[in-house]
Image (cartoon, rainbow, N blue to C red):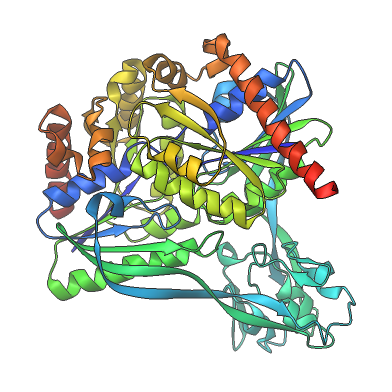
Amino acid sequence: MKELVVLSGKGGTGKTSIVASFAALAQSKVLVDCDVDAADLHLVLQPHIREDHEFWSGQVAVIDEGRCTQCNLCQELCRFDAIHNFKVDHISCEGCGFCPYICPTEAISMKENMSGRWFISDTRYGHLVHAKLGIAQENSGKLVATVRQQARQIAEKDGIDYIISDGPPGIGCPVISSLSGANLALLVTEPTLSGIHDLDRVLGACCHFGVAALVCVNKYDINEGNTRKIEEYCLSQGIMVGAKIPYNDAFTKAIVKGMPVVEYSQGVVAHEIESLWYYISKALTG
Amino acid sequence: MIVSVASGKGGTGKTLVATSLALSLKERTKVQLLDCDVEEPNAHLFLKPVITHSEAVCIPVPRVDNEKCTHCGRCAQVCVYHAIAVVPKHVLTFLELCHGCGACSYLCPERAITEEGREIGVVELGHSHGLGFAHGKLNIGEALAPPVIRKVKELANPDGVVIIDVPPGTSCPVVEAVKGSDFCILVTEPTPFGLNDLVLAVETVKALKILCGVVINRAGVGDRKVEEYCQKGNIPVLLVIPLDTEIARLYSKGITLVDGMPMWKNDFIKLFEKIGDIVHERVGRLER
């Protein structure tokens, strides 16, 4: 069983459209949406939810007003500025658990926090493990780790070849959690200065965690000079450019129809994504 | 006034709106742009600022004095991040897991733990053609963006208008960046992905009790459901930017919309005036 994670650094480069296409192209796979705070893959795959689980992670502090003498010590010691006027701001509380230890009247306790839900679903392309982080919640990294672990269990049980994960943007906590232990990262970029800048940082993260990477340039023809710069950059880093996809409104039209772009159109876009998947499947099993 | 520019979904045009809004206002008032997308900061690529001050962002992590330590295990017991472990004759620290809460050093009965800074990123302060600028960069391999975002926001100059470029998503980095704003602009695109993530972003901003309005970018590309949602939810649509290959071309080269197509300046000034009206109306209501 091999794990592919699709990342980009910059958001909106086409990660989800490409993962949805791989869902249609790959034979034996479990799909995972690791973008737990703004998940979109389900909009294309239209899952039928089979299992719905609460995600309890971390705690938040609660002050018992009856016991609180308003000594202010907790407010002074909280490093996250989460206590004001002897009340805990649950959005700012990191759940570090420091304040209950120092409260002289034992007025503070920690309460378990439900920070989201995760699901195992059936789709017309196979299993999908996905999640929904609660609004303004923390611990997205742990929720990502949970959905990946579930996907691995399914893949092992059913003897499935590939786990294909749609990753979050950025390079921080949820990206690190999506990346660690994956066999290959596909980095989807676009030929803009922002795309190039962000590719460099997300590739840095892949190198830092020892995950091999390859690059796909989406909308390559909106600035061919920048596309050449990306190709030269990848050459200098010893990274393969696996596909160059031209700008095409089929990408958006497929999203509106709720279909993978490879099923919506049979043009050059579909052809590029098909050969990209062929290359990736060889790279993963080779 | 602090105006943040967020989106839920990435790549909808936050940086485009934030930079063009800041540049459009700078002739009328003092403006500062804070790029709080510290994982992937991009505003500097468009504004090309002169950096005048740079500072490391550190979080306080424990340093254990082995002479004083009695290996009682208290520090490991209180650390919820599993960043410190005690074995019979040693204390092991896993500093990349430490959130810097300070519990271990404060609660150590032998006062054997002191704190020292561990660098996780950098903030830079500067200016670009009369526009104030600051941004932060999370070091590669680091997980915790919020402390870097907090540090960027400490550089805000409260005298004028502060525009905050927010990271994508709806979780802790977004909350950290948007918190304290007078108004939040949500940039979206008229597609099912754009709408799905806009709904999440609206809920996040509402949880923070911050006023919001929408900018629809790449109008004409998808369907009309974003407009219908805004109408139904009484969320003002402040500006509509069409799908235009010239705009995409300028963006790809790192040229802001108002530098490349100056006729847009007026639209951004009007956008800001609308925001001013909404914020003042709320203040008026609260005073009454």
**Which of B196 and B109 lies nearest the eye of the viewer?**
B196
| Residue A161 in sight | yes
The answer to which quarter of the image holds residue B77 is bottom right
Name the residue: 68% across, 50% down: B179
Q: Where is residue A88 in the image (x, y as percent from the top left)?
A: 73, 70
x, y percent for residue B131: 72, 22
The image quadrant that residue B32 belongs to is top right
Query: Which residue corresponds to the image point at 84% horizontal and 32% vertical from the top-left?
Result: B159
As displayed, is residue B18 above or below residue A144? above
Which of the pair A6/A113 is nearer the observer? A113
Q: Residue at x 70, y 37 (%)?
A: B278
> Can residue A11 be seen in this snapshot?
no
Q: In this view, does A131 lie to the left or right of A255?
A: right
Q: In this view, does B102 lie above or below B124?
A: below
Q: Which residue is drawn at 15% across and 57% down?
A: A125
x, y (%) of residue B18?
60, 30
Which quarter of the picture shows residue A61?
A: bottom right
Q: Where is residue B150 in the image (x, y as percent from the top left)?
A: 69, 49
